Amino acid sequence: KLMKNTTSEGDGDELGNLSFVGMNDNSDLIEYAFIRGVSDDVTDGTEDGALHLYTRVNDSSSARISIVDGLVGIGTTGPERKLHITEASGSTYVRIGNALSDPGILEFEASRSPGAGQQHSMGEIRWSNNNFTNTPVSIVGYIGGSGAAQKLGVSFDGTEKFFVDQNGHGS
């Protein structure tokens, strides 16, 4: 158990580190990785904590994975979604796959079913800018509704421009 014992608790206080230390080829002790616990909010009854995993790359340690408010960040210490992946510079790549001949699968699931004659989104892929304040292009999978029971729609600036239904027909 790691415990910060103080009478001056504060938001953002470092509560403890679990360090992984080894020697380099010059016999220097190096902290190669550590896990840090932080008290994000110490208000009685609404306490929040965060956990950050740090690793060393090119002799510099940075938080690589963070868990904050039930959100997981990779490359960010302030995730804004359940899984938020970012890169400091360049493009961000996510690879889904395995060592077998089976394909990698990205699956979207909605736990609700539409009512009779209603349609709702089962999943969406968005291309956005300005921190998700603008969504110029999206591809949405729909289920239910009149006409096509399942369809894949393509939208530009929030307006569906065309779709392909489960039978391969489009508009």
Image: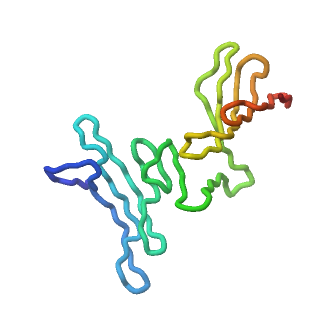
Residue situated in front as seen by the camera: 54 or 92:
92
Give above or below for 98 relative to 23: above
The residue depicted at 79 percent of the width and 18 percent of the height is 147
Q: Residue furthest bottom?
A: 26
State left or right for residue 42 relative to residue 71.
left
Q: Residue furthest left?
A: 7
State left or right for residue 63 relative to residue 135.
left
Quadrant into which the C terminus falls: top right
The residue depicted at 71 percent of the width and 55 percent of the height is 100
Q: Quadrant of residue 36?
A: bottom left
Q: Where does residue 136 sit, x and y in percent of width and height?
A: 66, 40
Q: Where does residue 47 sit, x and y in percent of width and height?
A: 28, 40
Q: Where does residue 168 sit, x and y in percent of width and height?
A: 85, 31
Quadrant into which the N terminus falls: bottom left
The residue depicted at 42 percent of the width and 81 percent of the height is 24
Give above or below for 162 relative to 8: above
Q: Residue furthest top?
A: 116
Q: How many marks?
A: 0
Residue situated in front as seen by the camera: 22 or 40:
40
Q: Where does residue 148 sit, x and y in percent of width and height?
A: 78, 22
State left or right for residue 147 relative to residue 77.
right
Q: How is colour applied across the structure in the image?
A: rainbow
The residue depicted at 36 percent of the width and 49 percent of the height is 50
State left or right for residue 29 relative to residue 56.
left
Give above or below for 60 relative to 150: below
